Image (cartoon, rainbow, N blue to C red):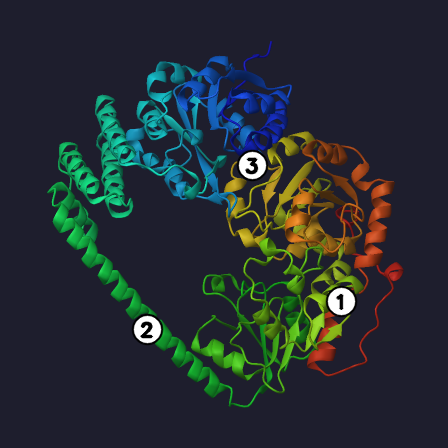
Amino acid sequence: MSDPQPPLTVVVHGRNVQGQLTETLGPLAREAAESGTQVVVAAVGASARAAAGRHPGIDVVPLPDGTSDGVARAAGADRATGRWLHFVPSKDTVPTGAAHAVADRVAGLPDTVDVLLTDHTRSTWRHARVPGPDGRHLAKADGRDVALGDCPDLLKAAPVLANRVLRREFWRAHVDHLATDDELYAAHAALLCADRIAVLDQAAVDVRQARPESLPPLTADDRFAALDTWERLLRLAGERAAGPGPYAVLYGAMVASSLRTVARAGLPEPEARAFFRRASKAAVDFRPPGHRRPGGLEGVRRRLLEEDAYAKYRAFQLADQRRRELRSAAASGRKAAARKVRAAQYHQDLRRPLDPHLAVFSAYWDRGVACNPAAIAAKLAELAPHIHPVWVVTRANAPLLPPGTDHVVPGSRRYWRTLATATYLVNNANFPNAVVKREGSVHLQTHHGTPLKRMGLDQLAYPAAAQGLNFHDLLARVDRWDYSVSSNSHSTEMWQRAYQSRYVELDYGYPRNDVYYTATAADVRAVRERLGIAPGRRALLYAPTHRDYEATWTPRLDLAALADRLGDDTVLLVRGHYFYGGAAAGALAGLRRSGRVLDVSTYDPVEELALAADALVTDYSSLMFDYANLDRPIVVYADDWETYAKTRGVYFDLLAEPPGAVARTQEELTAVLTGDDWRGEAATAARAAFRRRFCEYDDGRAAERVVRRVFLGETDVPPIVPLAERTPAPTPREATR
């Protein structure tokens, strides 16, 4: 018989703060049902009880208004049946996939481990899911379960109880330390009392932070209470014989917190002086044997604290503030002088003759050789080898360039000279405002996608999307364009209204999409071999887009659960948006080892991933317009379409004119992908209509048309091949025949 006890209970506790509990419980309840996780809501007040009562699978513990966090936490734990407990305040959320990941992790832990320490994100009114610095502390454990004495830096992880998952027997044994309302104490006490600690480098909670202005101001009593907490923790560390490492970390945190309070809390002078005296006594009384203060200014601050030299500390603080102001002014002066020198040199270079054999290329804000500019540069080498390409690439990305790529680093002397003297300037975004459009120079704007979301001037009505964009500067950049590349009539019309100027529209197709018609069966097989995809295995490319209302990328799907449902014959290729940098790597940690989920967020070019995939799963990414050229199935996962459309603004209703099957929930998506709907008749008909509208000019010869027209001055370019007469690259199944 299987063990009926679930591996994990998520205890959500507290009031229905700002109505957020409803938003938290829906996705959590669905995921918990799939992963065998119990959810208990210790609901404080009628609103919380009502929110929890809407979900039949949730155990509700009704509690009266005014019940404290510690009491609510304990009440939820009493109802829990899981072997492990994850306490989540009702104001916070559990990210998609986190409950499944935590349940999987704790199921494999030995009984000697008491605490699983996880990563977390933070959300404010302005930004969503911002990653913190805890990853580097968790990495110290190197994936092993450890004693705190062997890895004291774990105490530097954010002191919130929600990033500590506790073995239920451990909770019961130390409930006096853990059921307190003092979260700072409970969070650190959990690690101090644990025999061994395991880590999970994935966010298990998103901590919602209210605006400080909306919270009651901290009083002097609150400041003294925090100092009391640090002293209690240091005593507990001594009682638990945690060792010199953990004790030293806590001592350093106490001193740093005390100095921050004196420097920034804005306490009235008498209370500040009293706090300083009390903090001084604590710094001396709890100083570890053999402790050495750090060097530099921080060491001076700590010495003055230990000496209870309040007047000297304030004088030092004032002098240090003045020193920083002078240094900042000097640095600003040096930067201003350097800018003036560069500007003067650039304007001197503008008097040099244009080099007719020099072309500058940039893609995605100087990320590297990619997208339409890369396809144009490749065709340029074939048709016009006398024109020398120079790429603009950031210093960080320069080592990733193909060998032999001539490049300049933004801001360097050669960068400005190259921009001043190149006849051709090619970009899929825009060059800086300072770049001057010279008579005789040719600026080619290639764009980097078909617009579903509002762009350019059309963002005026969507400030969340515009994010402070200076529209006058935007139009000045647009006025430099000589040519604008388009892949369909829809794009041409939208560019004309979003970027109003006198440039010439090149209705030639997107050069980056040429490969979807020129790639061979051998090319498709080679890409799949590089990715490690076995012949006959279905590959689904999951490529969600950037959202202006999210600061970092987290999967909107429980990828582990989805991979389980799809089975071993399917591999998920997961590509996070480039705006989020390496955030996907952390979010997907652990899933890659299964071989059913591959993180391809940094794999370039994306066109190769499309060739390797049997189908595309996306939300609102422009990749769907490109992928449609392959005439392979596309599934739209639109769980937040209304929010996206309202905040970003869109040019058409994707749900009314989709490229294939549409799913609004993970359950619907799973049903689509495990059945035949993803490639059924309805999906095929929708894709055909989508292709007629959006694959209008893409036929495999776009780069050739652009090079002949822009660089060679030819007006008689190859005509567009009708859609019905085009042959896309072979599918993976066709490539293996």
Q: Residues within 10 Å of mark 3 (few under 14, many from 20)?
A: some
Find the distance from the CA under tag 3 to the CA under tag 1: 41 Å
The residue that disc 2 covers is 334
Looking at the image, tell me whether mark 2 or mark 1 is earlier in sequence order: 2
The residue that disc 1 covers is 492
The residue that disc 3 covers is 591
Looking at the image, tell me whether mark 3 or mark 1 is earlier in sequence order: 1
Q: Could you say which quadrant of the image residue 6 lies in? A: top right
| Three-letter residue code for mark 2 | Arg
Q: In this rendering, is residue 196 above or below 544? A: above
Q: Secondary structure at mark 2?
A: helix
Find the distance from the CA under tag 2 to the CA under tag 1: 45 Å
Residue 139 in the figure: left or right of residue 398: left
The picture places residue 235, in percent across and down from the top left corner, at: 22, 25
Of residues 20 and 230, the one drawn nearer to the viewer in this rendering: 20
Identify the residue at image location x=37%, y=40%: 137
| Three-letter residue code for mark 1 | Thr
Q: How many marks?
A: 3
Callout 2–callout 1 Cβ contact below 8 Å: no
Q: Is residue 617 visible?
A: yes
Q: Residues within 10 Å of mark 2 (few under 14, many from 20)?
A: few
Callout 3–callout 1 Cβ contact below 8 Å: no
Residue 389 in the figure: left or right of residue 264: right
